[in-house]
Image (tube, rainbow, N blue to C red):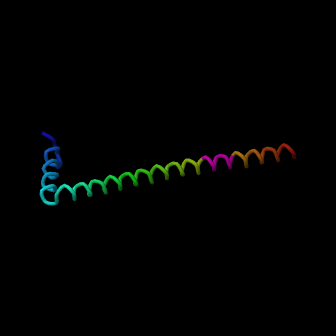
Amino acid sequence: MGEGLFSPLHLLLLVIIFLLLFGPSKFASVTKGLGKGLGDGYRNFKSAMNEGEQNKEEKEEKNVKTTDAKTSDEKKS
C-alpha cells in the first residue's frame, strides 16, 4: 500500500473520523474556506508575478530610452 505517513487509506480514515465528530456541514465549511484561501493565495501570487514582469519591462524601456538619448547626444557633439 502507500508509503509514508499519509497514505490514501490514512487520509480516508481521517475524513471519516472528522465527519463523525463534526458532521457534514462543518466539513463543507472547512473545505470551502480552505479552497477560498488557496484560490486567493494563487491569485495574489499570479498578480505579484505579473507586476514584477511589468516593472522589469518598464525598467528595460527606460534603459533603452536613456541609452538612445545618450547616443543621440554623442552624435550631436
Helix, strand or loop for the magenta stretch, by majority: helix
Q: Residue 65 or 49: which is nearer the viewer?
A: 49
> Is residue 59 found left or right of 45 in the rendered image?
right
Q: Residue furthest top?
A: 1
**Which residue is drawn at the image coordinates 58% and 48% (left, top)?**
54
Q: Residue furthest right?
A: 77
The vertical placement of 73 against 20, above or below, is above
**Which residue is drawn at the image coordinates 68% and 49% (left, top)?**
62
**Which residue is drawn at the image coordinates 21% and 57% (left, top)?**
25
Q: Which residues are magenta?
A: 57-63
Rendered location of residue 71, percent (x, y): 78, 44
Rendered location of residue 50, percent (x, y): 52, 48
Question: What is the quadrant of residue 75 in the picture?
Answer: top right
> Is residue 23 found left or right of 55 in the rendered image?
left
Q: Residue 15 or 32: which is nearer the viewer?
A: 32
Q: Residue 74 or 25: which is nearer the viewer?
A: 25
Q: Is residue 48 magenta?
A: no
Rendered location of residue 6, percent (x, y): 18, 48
Of the 4 image quadrants, the one containing the N terminus is: top left
**Which residue is drawn at the image coordinates 12% and 55% (left, top)?**
17
